[in-house]
Amino acid sequence: MAVNLKKMAADRELLAGGHRSCAGCSAPAILRQALHVAGPDTVVGFATGCMEVTTTIYPFSSWRVPYIHCAFENAAATLSGVEAAYRALKRRGRIPEDKKINFIAFGGDGGTYDIGFQSLSGAMERGHNMVYICYDNNAYMNTGIQRSSATPRGAATNTSPSGRVIHGKEQPRKDLTACMVAHNIPYVAQASVSRHTDFMRKVERALEIDGPAFINILQPCHRGWRCKTEDSIELARVAVECRWWPLLEVDHGRWKINYKPKQVVPVNDWFKLQGRFTRLLADGNEEILAWHQEQVEKKWADLLAKESASAAGPDS
């Protein structure tokens, strides 16, 4: 897909301005970009979270497509029911056979990695023709910056504070992208808000596919990551350059790395830009920092091996 920025500028925005997200928040850009690809014939399901709260303050709404707000834990279940109803209405002739409607569920990492994981897993396993997009900001940001299973080891949150004894979250983060690959669904991808053309192409591919698709997109939160409001996109960019957040897709079992940095930067360069890692960067925490770099190297080597095996074909 070739993204035409002039056409995007001329298109009617399907997420209206005037919402109340934080200054510098990159999540609205994710929603806008996805809707530019999907178009007006789209039904959106949204879990409780930052973007639900800031775009649907009663009696107003920023959404110019059919929109369903559901509980924190069941965005995937709710939208899978809508998609099933759509298919039933088509069978009964209530909706024209050639009428194509896109179904997209959105959720943050709290409502996706944790509370909503059961309903997400069920919707993917049942094979509903829908796309689930997780905007991953590494914590429960909407309710006060509590740790989630997406929070990196060593990151400080209000429920995993960093001090002299405990240095932030003690556990490694969950690899939700790998969990979705393990569901054997047709399409899984990782994207970054810093690379909009890559993300929009992945949304387009996800919508083309007959069956469930999942996209995990990194979305820095300046409040939780303790950085400048204007640095959201830069933080997302450096996360890709240090390979902490690789851009990849698994299309019907075929692995592909979408971007390979020419000049790899250490993961510490990314940590230094964020106040949530201040304690981790102090003397005495070299073991945790070395662990992070080792994990990045190990996972990158694993991705290269999977990509190579996919390119070689099933008989390799």
Image (cartoon, rainbow, N blue to C red):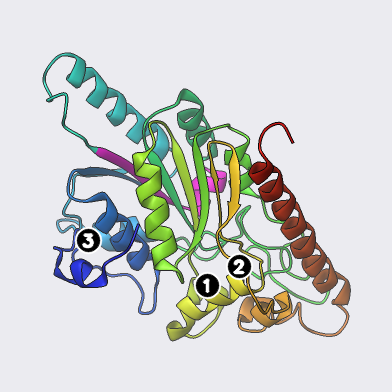
Residue, disc 2? 158
- Circle 2 SS class: loop
In this image, 43 relative to 176: left or right?
left
The x and y percentages for residue 190 are 53, 55
Q: Quadrant of the C terminus?
A: top right
From this view, report whether residue 193 is shown above or below residue 127: below
Q: Does residue 68 belong to the magenta stretch? A: no
Density class for disc 3 (Cα within 10 Å; few <14, some 14-19, many ≥20) is many
Q: Amino acid at mark 1?
A: Ala
From this view, report whether residue 302 is shown above or below residue 197: above
Which mark is drawn over residue 15? 3
The residue located at (61%, 62%) in the rendering is: 246
The residue located at (79%, 69%) in the rendering is: 293
Q: Is residue 71 visible?
A: no
Mark with earlier residue (3, 1)? 3
In this image, 196 relative to 191: left or right?
left
